[in-house]
Image (cartoon, rainbow, N blue to C red):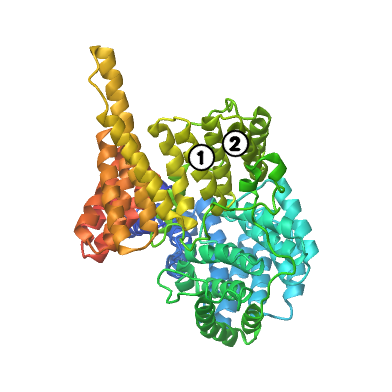
């Protein structure tokens, strides 16, 4: 018996709200199977649309071709069963499919041309505008290195926008990208700056165009502007959806040409998965070529700089460069053979010949220098401020061998961007109120660099006045700004100063814990994990000493206060365990991972004991992933199930689906398909 249409639509709507990943895709596949077997037919277009969308944005582009083909076939058979939303989705997906067919060198030119012609025919029959078709023909010409690319570009730009056009930010972003890569750098910069001024955003913008803007400024000999655009690009990239392979690759090119070897290595290590597998072969080739470009600019001077890039078999920058060239060459040959051109070979050759920019890139904000006495300070952003005490450049990637969701979770739980560190005094107490007011205003206006410098100056003023607690919180706020601006070396040094001042000023251990938790990601990325662990363990010992020193209070009120303090200390101890577990996990070393499991599991139990269910779920999730990586699948499944249950209790559907991704993958891999189906079924409830 067929389910009611409203019930199916509600279920598909819930799936559409889940984060992209295995759980969402398999839940969508399950609904398609049910609708095809049981009906109702009026839900089939919606079900197939949800599946196409789920696969495409989860990086399973090639798999999405099949449900898209079924969707087109259903349109041909029963167009009356498509409502306006279904119809729009069908023609919108045409753009995705045509574009991504070109990303596979095994798809012949004739097939791409036939699909393009079919798209154009169907758009015309449906009365749609021609802008999407013009854009598709232009991008196909660029891919082939065709002589008519410029003509088709001009034709696309002149075509009126319609309901199937690129979004209002992607459209100028794509135009600017072509202008920059075809040598019209000044024109590209003007277009990007005009678009940025509108404040419009989408899934991939402004991260994409900012990455182009940073490179354009470097090409123009404007390194300070390039640095500012780069920082904005990194901040925007954290909020973008999808793999963002192009923006991530351009980041590596910029760092290489700008002479930023330590930052380049950290960026490569962070995105090492893209070296081995991206959404499409074309995306992987583009990323490999960008890595070739960025590393070439640093050779031979930095040939022996250490690199640890996950499963990529390299240990130095020179080895990474050679490996990326070797991996790119067969892909280059395959695409050029399909396209009957030398476009990709020319790009690879150009990347191998990359050299440093005429003006080196200075990404040092001078934050540590800004905390010196006024007579010793040497300037603001882009100046010659020293980073002494911030720690050596790292080689520790964000999240290490963990998943992308894990790496994102580390930063998210450390504190929201621009929101500051818990415990800080908004008025600043004795810290310089003018600088604090400037910092708050700058943050509200999105001027994070200015805010960071103002907080650093406020910290120095408070310290000079002997107000160590105020100085500590101002240092912590400056450190958080540095994290947002991708300056983990400065953030590490500033957090270290913050904790030292807070402890010296007499702050309670529990009040210092949020600052230490926020510090953890920067300590890992800047290679300062041992120093961080010493501080965190000392703080944990101080919490334990305070608990031991407790006395039994008299009276109900005293007992209630004592119990609240005990809960707060246990919660703070769990926060430390959780933060140190994530840092240890990022190191990718067996002993460190085993210790990370111990601390994560302990944090989970403590969180659960004090009623912090969402935090317990996050800690169970971390322990489950780590245990799975160590081959302890039964223990991993138990911890992952606990995580899913915790997020269910907390009514956090989004994160529950992400944890379910890992659980379902483990269950499928170990032959527990029935159990996996139960998990997927529960996600709809």
Residue 666 visible in the picture: yes
Residue 548, picture quadrant = top left
How many numbered badges does the structure rendering display? 2
Residue at 48% in and 68% down: 274
User: Measured from the top left, where is residue 365 in percent x and y?
Assistant: 65, 50
Per the image, the residue denoted by label 1 is 498
Q: Secondary structure at mark 2?
A: helix
Horizontal side of residue 534 vs 462, given as left or right: left
Q: Residue at x 58, y 53 (%)?
A: 388
Residue 359: image location, x then y, percent: 74, 65
The residue that disc 2 covers is: 459
* Circle 2 crowding by C-alpha within 10 Å: few under 14, some 14–19, many from 20: many
State if disc 2 and disc 1 touch (CB < 8 Å). yes
Depth check: give the residue in front, 250 or 199.
Answer: 250
Q: Nearer the viewer, residue 537 or 602?
A: 537
- The residue at the point 66 percent across, 83 percent down is 346
Query: Between marks 1 and 2, how big is the CA–CA gap?
Result: 9 Å
Instruction: Report x, y in % for residue 342.
Output: 65, 86
Secondary structure state at the residue bearing disc 1: helix
> Where residue 664 sits in the image (x, y, percent)?
29, 57
């Amino acid at each position: 018996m067929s389910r009611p249409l409203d019930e199916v639509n509600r279920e598909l709507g819930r799936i559409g709200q889940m984060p992209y990943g295995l759980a969402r895709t398999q839940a969508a596949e399950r609904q398609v199977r049910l609708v095809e077997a049981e009906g109702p037919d009026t839900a089939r277009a919606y079900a197939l649309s949800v599946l196409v969308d789920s696969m495409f944005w989860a990086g399973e582009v090639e798999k999405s071709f099949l449900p898209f083909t079924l969707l087109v076939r259903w349109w041909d058979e029963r167009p009356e069963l498509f409502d306006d939303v279904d119809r729009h989705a069908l023609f919108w997906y045409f753009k995705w499919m045509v574009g991504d067919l070109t990303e596979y060198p095994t798809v012949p030119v004739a097939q791409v041309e036939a699909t393009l012609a079919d798209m154009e025919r169907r758009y015309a029959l449906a009365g749609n505008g021609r802008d999407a078709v013009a854009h598709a023909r232009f991008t196909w010409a660029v891919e082939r290195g065709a002589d008519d690319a410029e003509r088709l570009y001009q034709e696309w730009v002149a075509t009126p926008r319609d309901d199937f056009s690129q979004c209002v930010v992607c459209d100028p972003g794509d135009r600017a990208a072509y202008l920059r890569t075809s040598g019209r750098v000044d024109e590209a910069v003007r277009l990007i700056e005009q678009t940025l001024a509108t404040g419009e955003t989408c899934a991939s913008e402004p991260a994409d165009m900012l990455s182009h803007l940073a490179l354009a400024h470097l090409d123009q000999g404007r390194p300070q502007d390039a640095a500012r655009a780069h920082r904005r690009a990194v901040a925007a990239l954290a909020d973008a959806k999808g793999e963002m392979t192009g923006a991530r690759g351009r980041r590596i090119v910029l760092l290489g040409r700008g002479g930023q070897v330590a930052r380049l290595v950290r960026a490569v290590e962070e995105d090492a998965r893209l070296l081995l597998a991206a959404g499409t072969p074309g995306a992987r080739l583009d990323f490999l070529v960008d890595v070739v470009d960025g590393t070439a600019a640093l050779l031979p001077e930095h040939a022996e700089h250490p690199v640890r890039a996950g499963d990529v078999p390299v240990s130095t920058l020179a080895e990474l460069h050679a490996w990326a060239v070797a991996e790119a060459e067969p892909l280059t040959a395959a695409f050029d053979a399909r396209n009957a051109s030398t476009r990709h070979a020319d790009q690879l050759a150009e990347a191998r010949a990359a050299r440093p920019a005429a003006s080196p890139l200075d990404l040092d904000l001078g934050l540590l220098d800004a905390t010196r006495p006024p007579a010793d300070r040497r300037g603001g952003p882009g100046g010659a401020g020293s980073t002494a005490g911030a720690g050596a450049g790292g080689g520790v990637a964000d999240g290490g061998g963990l998943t992308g969701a894990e790496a994102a979770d580390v930063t998210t739980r450390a504190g929201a961007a621009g929101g500051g560190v818990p415990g800080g005094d908004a008025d600043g107490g004795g810290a310089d109120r003018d600088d604090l007011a400037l910092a708050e205003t700058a943050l509200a206006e999105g001027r994070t660099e200015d805010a960071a410098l103002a907080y650093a100056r406020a910290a120095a003023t408070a310290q000079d006045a002997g107000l160590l607690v105020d100085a500590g919180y101002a240092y912590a706020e400056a450190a958080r700004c540095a994290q947002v601006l991708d300056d983990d070396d400065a953030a590490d040094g500033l957090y270290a100063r913050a904790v030292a001042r807070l402890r010296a000023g007499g702050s309670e251990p529990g009040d210092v814990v949020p600052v230490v938790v926020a510090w953890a990601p920067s300590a890992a990325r800047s290679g300062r994990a041992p120093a961080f662990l010493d501080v965190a363990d000392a703080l944990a010992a101080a919490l334990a000493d305070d608990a031991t020193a407790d006395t039994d209070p008299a009276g109900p009120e005293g007992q209630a206060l004592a119990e609240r303090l005990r809960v707060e200390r246990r919660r703070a101890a769990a926060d430390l365990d959780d933060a140190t577990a994530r840092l240890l996990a990022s190191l990718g070393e067996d002993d460190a991972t085993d210790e990370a499991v111990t601390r994560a599991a302990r944090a989970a139990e403590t969180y659960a004991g004090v009623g912090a269910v969402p935090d317990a779920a996050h800690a169970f999730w971390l322990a489950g992933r780590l245990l799975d990586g160590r081959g302890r699948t039964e223990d991993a499944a138990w911890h992952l199930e606990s995580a899913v249950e915790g997020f269910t209790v907390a009514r956090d559907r989004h994160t529950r689906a992400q944890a379910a991704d890992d659980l379902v993958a483990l269950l499928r891999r170990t032959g527990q398909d029935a159990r996996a189906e139960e998990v997927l079924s529960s996600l709809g409830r």
